[in-house]
Amino acid sequence: MTATLRSMLLPLDIRDSNMATSSNPLREEIASTDVPAAISHYTDAVRFGNILFVSGFTPHDEAGNLIGGDDVAAQARQVHENLKKILTQAGATFADILKVTVFLTDINDRAKINPVRQEYFGSAKPASTLVQISALALPGMKIEIEAVVGLPNRSPLGEKLGARA
């Protein structure tokens, strides 16, 4: 494609813009030191106004060790503990979670993880999607959970969350 054609097709000249920087004051990336480090190009959560989008959490501790081995319920407990850390730092609880997506490598494990889920959510029932997938990002993982959280009106999260070193 010639430069002239490209300039006609793109109404804005994006060659000189920084696509990675948001000028939207409602958007804030959150990276916590209390959960496993991201394994790729993403952050633990993104706040947009009073909505918090939480990346998929895995059954790993802060040092990156897989917790639970082959026990999917133990892995689910670690995932929920990791979610709890982000929620607490954001001033939210499991009752504030609006939607979860649960990824399992074996759909039959649903019955094993539901009691763990009920321990953390109590009577709160978020919208939920359960998906069986062939594999997760790291060896040994049987479960991963992402969430969307409704936050109460409050100040920016950066004041409460520790920055990743």
Image (tube, helix red, strand yellow):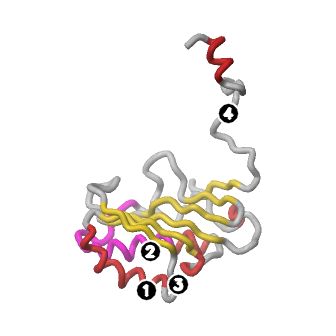
Q: Amino acid at mark 4?
A: Asn
- What residue is at 38 percent from the left and 77 percent from the top? 77
Whether pointer 1 and pointer 2 mark residues with C-beta atoms closer than 8 Å, the reply is yes
**Which badge, 1 or 3, comes first in the chain's sequence?**
1
Amino acid at dot 2: His
Secondary structure under the numbered disc 3 in the rendered image? loop
Q: Quadrant of the N terminus?
A: top right
Lower sequence index among marks 2 and 3: 2
Q: Dot 3, crowdedness within 10 Å: few (<14), some or many (≥20)? A: few
Mark positioned earlier in the residue sequence (4 or 3): 4
In 3D space, how far apart are the residues under numbered discs 1 and 2 (Cα atoms)? 10 Å
Q: Position of residue 109 (x, y in %)?
A: 27, 73
Foreground mark, 4 or 3, reads 3
Which of the two residues, 64 or 139, is positioned nearer the viewer here?
139
**Can residue 4 be seen here?**
yes
The CA span between labels 4 and 2 is 36 Å
For label 2, the SS is: helix
Residue beneath the point at 66% across and 71% down? 151
Amino acid type of disc 3? Answer: Ala
Q: Earlier in the sequence, mark 4 or mark 1?
A: 4
Image: magenta residue range: 64-83
Q: Name the residue at 62% across, 63% down.
A: 162
Q: Which residue corresponds to the image point at 67% horizontal and 59% vertical from the top-left? A: 48
Q: Quadrant of residue 56?
A: bottom left
Identify residue for label 1.
119
Asked if the stretch drawn in magenta spans residue 88, the answer is no
